[in-house]
Image (cartoon, rainbow, N blue to C red):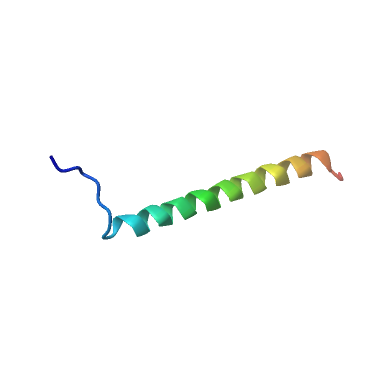
Amino acid sequence: MRTAQRCGGKIIPVVLFFEILLGAASVLILWFAIYTLYRLVNDES
């Protein structure tokens, strides 16, 4: 029986693109959380 695994073609660049997108979203969420906590702690008003 043949497996449904595709090693080549267009599937690898798509997976790589979404992994990079996931990493960028994680960094953005982490930055926003740290920035929000910083603004809460250092409230100047």
| Quarter of the image where one finds residue 12 | bottom left
Residue reaching furthest to the left:
1
Quadrant the N terminus occupies = top left
The residue shown at (77%, 43%) is 38
Query: Which residue occupies the extreme front position in the image?
Result: 1
Q: Residue at x 21, y 44 (%)?
A: 4
The x, y position of residue 37, in whole percent, is 74, 40
Q: Looking at the picture, tell me which residue is in the foreground, 1 or 11.
A: 1
Q: Quadrant of residue 44?
A: top right
Report the number of numbered marks. 0
* Residue, far right: 44
Residue 11 % position (x, y) = 30, 55
**What percent of the width, then of the height, locates residue 43?**
83, 42
Name the foreground residue: 43 vs 10: 10
Residue 29 shown left or right of residue 14 in the figure: right
Locate the C terminus and report the quarter of the image it occupies.
top right
